[in-house]
Amino acid sequence: MFDIKKFRDTPTPFYYYDMELLSNTLDAIKKASPEKEYCVHYAIKANSNPMILKFIAKNGFGADCVSEGEIRAAINAGFPAEKIVFAGVGKGDSEIDFAIDNGVGCFNVESLPELQLINEMAINKDKVVNVALRVNPNIDAHTHHYITTGLDENKFGIALEMLDEAITYCLKQPNLHLIGLHFHIGSQITTNEPFKVLCAKINAMVEHYSAQGINFESINVGGGLGIDYENPDSNPIPDFSSYFDTFRKNLKLSKGQSLHFELGRSVVAQCGSLITKVLYVKEGLKKKFVIVDAGMTDLIRPALYQAHHLIQNITSSSSLTETYDVVGPICESSDCFGVNETLPVTSRGDLLALRSAGAYGEIMASQYNCRKLPQAIFN
Ligand code: LLP
């Protein structure tokens, strides 16, 4: 996976990206979704490192952005503006202004007041803006409660009961072009069942509106496909075939209708690892701690979502193992990457890899404790 000698002098912690794996992952997505009606927008929030963005843009993908900064990053990396969708429950006035001026392909709108503001700004600029309405379909994605988004109690999307009003409003505004409906039910979804349920709900809605003479050019099903955090080497590329097949088999697309996806984690998670150095091996009364130089500031997912990233000692040659808690240097008890981890006997100076960290890793890093941000290294 990783040539240690090459990175001996790189200051730790750092993110290491395997670009060959990223390339193979992008190829797998393209192979599993060859239809011209299918359009995959990479969800930039997962990782907006410029090298990664340029590589994904070069491969012909669109982008899913949630802020002006992300739109700027996408445009700088070469994503065509018309392939950018702009989502988010709280788009600021200046962000909407920027997105209209730069001709983004579609606004995924989450409320009536947002729709009214976009309309006002479009009128002032004498422009017609494409909008899709984000619907909250009330589906349980069976994932961590912080990353489930499609339930009634979540802040996202327009409730089904209020959709008629939003559609009627759009249809009356010459400066809004309603192109479709948008959904996103959650993240790290590891079975296709919730996506099947989503398809059934979409079919019913599309049929309901079609009976009233309202037809949609595009359906956007969001992202959410999960990855295998425990076995990154046996499952380096998510099962895109069965993911896209789920939509192929269960979603009725009418002629000319396009289907949009916003995949983030499944595109970039497995190609990234956080490499960290062991500072100390500390004997506690009940435990042995491996204290590493990466902390929750570099990878917050374990502290925030109780997520577990596979931890590997990539320099120890010991055939004996020990049980350790692997912890960082930050002054918080949640700064812990693993409890009772079995690792080869580990010593000061060893390098550990925290795997599957390409998504929501580097981009969520912070400078808490006045720490430096981790660097990124590409193979
Ligand atoms: N579309 C929308 C509207 C979203 O809100 C998200 C993610 C995506 C697409 C991409 O979802 P993905 O394919 O990556 O599952 N920081 C959390 C994940 C937050 C996801 C937020 N929305 C984590 O580290 O697990």
Image (spheres, helix red, strand yellow):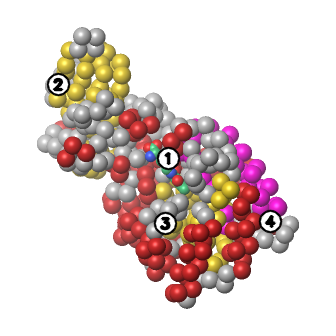
Q: Mark 4 points at which residue?
A: 209
Do the residues bearing badges 3 and 4 touch, measured as CB atoms within 8 Å? no
For marks 3 and 1, the one nearer the N-term is 3
Q: How far apart are marks 2 and 3 (CA)?
A: 45 Å
Q: Distance between the residues labelled 1 and 4?
A: 32 Å
Direction left: furthest residue? 9
Q: How far apart are marks 1 and 2 (CA)?
A: 34 Å
**CA neighbours of label 4 inside 10 A, class few (<14), some (14 to 19), many (20+):** some
Q: Residue at x 49, y 35 (%)?
A: 228
Q: Position of residue 50 (x, y in %)?
A: 33, 61
For marks 1 and 4, the one nearer the N-term is 4
Q: Mark 3 points at which residue?
A: 91
Secondary structure under badge 3?
Answer: loop
Is 242 left or right of 309, judged from the image as shown?
right
For marks 2 and 4, the one nearer the N-term is 4
Amino acid type, mark 1: Ser
Q: What is the magenta range?
A: 180-208
Amino acid type, mark 3: Lys
The circle drawn on residue 114 is none
Ligand 1 lies under 8 Å from the Cβ of mark 1: yes
**CA neighbours of label 2 inside 10 A, class few (<14), some (14 to 19), many (20+):** some
Q: Position of residue 90 (x, y in %)?
A: 50, 62
Q: Name the residue under label 1.
A: 266
